Amino acid sequence: MHQTGINKITSENLILKMSMSEEDLEKIIEKLINGITKEKCSNRREYSKGDILGFKVVTADCPHGVYVYNKNTGIWELVGEDYTMHDGYYVMYFDNTYCPACRIFDFSWYIMIETLGKEYDKITFIIVHCGWFTKSCESKIAREFFEKFDIHSSPTILLLRIKNGEVVRKERMKGSEAIEYLAERIEQFMETN
């Protein structure tokens, strides 16, 4: 079983975990903050593969939809309306473009995914991105995910275990403080199957 030993995400814990220098971590943080705050989504498109668009950071002006993190490229891929969740573990971030708390949450979320995401090889990381829940969402699949998982506050993190096509376990974490203990909660969630 994968163990991180992180109880609370802090720069000190990330430096120790990733065996990187404080300078390297500062570069990652600066890169992510610049991506979140300074550029428009359309200016940051990393690639387009058929119907899939890829972005380094999903910001408020990105298209509504479901984004899956590609651990090999470090890119969030906007998947099609026919996306299906297969058996496995999922960490889903429900994001609204008109949510100020989500914009604050983004800083920690992207740093955590950038530094720890590859270590969780059995987990699929997803962002479900709408304007304002189902009331303002241009993506059918994103609306369906908000409805299916009964999401009425943001930011919300949902930990899921899908087996034989059914959700067999889920845990919800609400609010911006959810990120502080996310690594620990992911490990506890995976240990209890």
Image: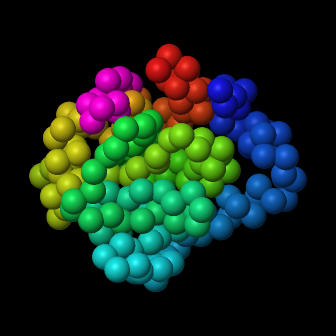
Can you say whether 48 is above or below 23 in the image? Answer: below
The answer to if 168 sits in the magenta stretch is: yes
Q: Is residue 31 above or below residue 150?
A: below
Q: Residue 165 placed where, x, y %?
A: 27, 36
- Position of 18 with respect to 176 (left or right) is right
Q: Position of residue 173 (x, y in %)?
A: 41, 29
From the viewer's side, name the closer residue of 190 and 105: 190
**Residue 68 or 84: which is nearer the viewer?**
84
The residue at the point 35 percent across, 33 percent down is: 162
Q: Is residue 61 above or below residue 122?
A: below
Q: Residue furthest front?
A: 164
At x 27%, y 56%, the residue is 83
* Quadrant occupied by the N terminus: top right
Instruction: Note whether residue 89 is visible.
Output: yes
Left or right: 68 as drawn, with respect to 133 = right
- Toward which corner of the image does residue 28 lie, by quadrant? bottom right
* Magenta extent: 162-172
Residue 112 in the image: state x and y as whole percent: 61, 46
Q: Nearer the viewer, residue 133 or 65?
A: 65
